[in-house]
Amino acid sequence: MDNKRPQPQPQQLSLAKSARQHCSEWIFRDVPSDITIEVNGGTFALHKFPLVSRSWRIRKLVAEHRDSDISRIELLNLPGGAETFELAAKFCYGINFEITSANVAQLCCVSDYLEMTEDFSKDNLGSRAEEYLESIVCKSLEMCVEVLQQCENLLPLADELKIVSRCIDAIASKACVEQIASSFSRLEYSSSGRLHMNRQGKCDGDWWIEDLSVLRIDLYQRVMTTMKCRGVRPESIGLSLMNYAQKELTKKHSLWNPSSQTKVDLISGSHGHEQHVVETIVSLLPIEKLAVPINFLFGLLRSAVMLDCAVACRLDLERRIASQLDIAALDDLLIPSLRHAGDTLFDVDTVHRILLNFAQQDDSEDDMDDASVIESDSPHSPSQTALFKVSKLVDNYLAEIAPDSNLKLAKFMVIAETLPAHARTVQDGLYRAIDIYLKAHQNLSDSDKKKLCRLIDFQKLSQEAGAHAAQNERLPLQSMVQVLYFEQLRLRNSLCCSYPDEDHKPVQQSWRISSGALSAAMSPRDNYASLRRENRELKLELARLRMRLNDLEKEHVCMKRDMEKSHSRKFMSSFSRKIGKLSFFGLSSSRGSSSPSKHSYRTDSKVIERTCASTD
């Protein structure tokens, strides 16, 4: 017989016709038939005696109609159809045929259906098929897989006869043996004479991965579950899941082109199978971290979103991704949305939930004990390193989604605010993303711009980013003032560090934002007009400031070089006088003094407060 896989019921009529045509080749030609057997629409003209001598079921049917001399019997729902019944009839007639892995499951089921057991007749079909299954099939992983394929159309009878469970146990045992043998093959001696495992060597114990990919998803799930219980390596389980998903989820390319389909189209019809595959694979993922690559997890998440899989499935994937988010790439986070009208280009809500899982996981790890809390504050601890990496990833993600015209301010801000403040030691990336958003959404109100820019800690901008922000007209005036202040503060602190022996005044006392003082007795209208004039003057000073800072830095380098040569107190006093003549804003005191008095400092502090209040 050909080793063909049993076909579905609609095609068994042709098989019955073929069996009827060949039936006359092996039955007794000199004895007329006295019984006709109907199987799935096909008929077999046979003889009662050979059949009743082996099949207890047929014998009972004939005995029940002994008075009417029955000549026709219909066997409903016979497992394996007409092709399998032909083999059983041949066995009854004593005609030899070969039992193979392609028909042993059908023979076990049909022998149970026809009650061709050892209790009724010695060396019956049931015992022959069972012997082949135990002694031949269960010794070979490939043959077990082939038998499981045949069992797909024989359920639930194949389960009741434990054909499926025996094959699954044999597959899991064989995989474990191969795994152990492969581990021994990678053992080698080091230069010191110690025995160790070469982890870089190729693992040959996973050859079964390709064989299992032909199974139907329900049987594949049972095989994987048994393998995990038997102790097969999580990495091997992960490789098998990846191979199976690649074969099952890439059969229909329309799944990966959601722009041409609606959400209803994705979850209807043929995509129900893909949905079940994704949910099953997620349930089979090993609990061990890094057992599967993170890009595979993101691929499953994209499929789960497109196919509208169960919420529990998506949440499980998001939790797994969050646990290793620090090794993710920007392309992984760019999960496309379903492209409804008004939708954002990318699925921002899913990324937000992933970030929340990451932040909560980091908090839970830090709260485990006091030692971990102390270590988390160290920039060299693993949790802090992961935070740094994820913060850069989030900033790049924000810059990528910022140009989307449909992206609301609230969604943009909630992504930026998910990570704790200490995650970003430098906020150049966040500033860049906010600047891109401001450029793409020019219709934002002033209050929204201020709200957005409050996310930036301008003290954490680099010198280059600060220089850009100081001249960025898209930023609110209040933010520009803050940038300017911190730039001056950074320069002042740099000078203090360069000349620690000098008696410098406190940084706050050298800060002067305006040459004019606002009177508390001013009317609100005059106060507002004065603030607007000072704001205009401040913008003009921004451009001049950069030039004077450059000149000051050049002079600082020259002075330092001269000081190293002279080492004289006279030179230091000369340097102090030169510094005193410089004004950061080019505004000299009318009294000729280089440092402001306490009264002028208090007045200027009021100016700063009122400037910030007016911009709010």
Image (cartoon, rainbow, N blue to C red):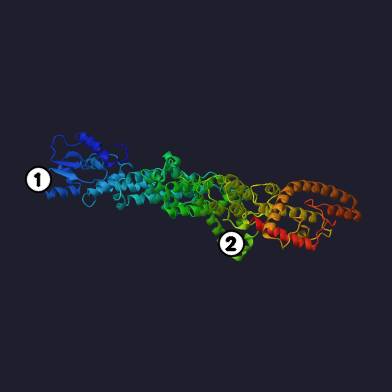
Q: Is residue 365 above or below residue 43?
A: below
Residue that appears at 74% across and 49% down: 541
Q: Quadrant of the N terminus?
A: top left
Q: Indicate left or right for 279 with 325 as reference.
A: left
Indicate the position of residue 457 as horizontal and vertical percent values. 65, 55
Indicate the position of residue 27 as horizontal and vertical percent values. 18, 37
- Which quadrant would residue 530 be assigned to in this image? bottom right
Q: Indicate left or right for 316 with 415 as reference.
A: left
Say if residue 140 shows up in the picture.
Answer: no
Dot 1 corresponds to which residue? 69
Indicate which disc, 2 or 1, sits on the residue closer to the N terminus.
1
Q: What residue type is labelled 1?
A: Asp
Residue that appears at 64% across and 63% down: 374
Residue that appears at 50% across and 52% down: 349
* SS of the residue under disc 1: loop
Tell me if mark 1 has few (under 14), some (14-19) or many (20+) residues whose alpha carbon lies within 10 angstroms of its own. Answer: few
Mark whose residue sits in front, 2 or 1: 2
* SS of the residue under disc 2: helix
* 60 and 234: which is toward the camera: 234
Tell me if mark 2 has few (under 14), some (14-19) or many (20+) residues whose alpha carbon lies within 10 angstroms of its own. Answer: some
* 361 and 78: which is toward the camera: 361
Indicate the position of residue 77 as horizontal and vertical percent values. 23, 46
Indicate the position of residue 317 as horizontal and vertical percent values. 48, 52
Q: How far apart are marks 2 and 1 (CA)?
A: 85 Å
- Please give the label number shown on residue 49: none
Dot 2 corresponds to which residue? 366
Q: What residue type is labelled 2?
A: Asp
Q: In which quarter of the image is the C terminus?
A: bottom right
Mark 2 vs 1: CB contact within 8 A: no
Q: Indicate left or right for 595 with 5 as reference.
A: right
Which residue occupies the extreme bottom position in the image? 370
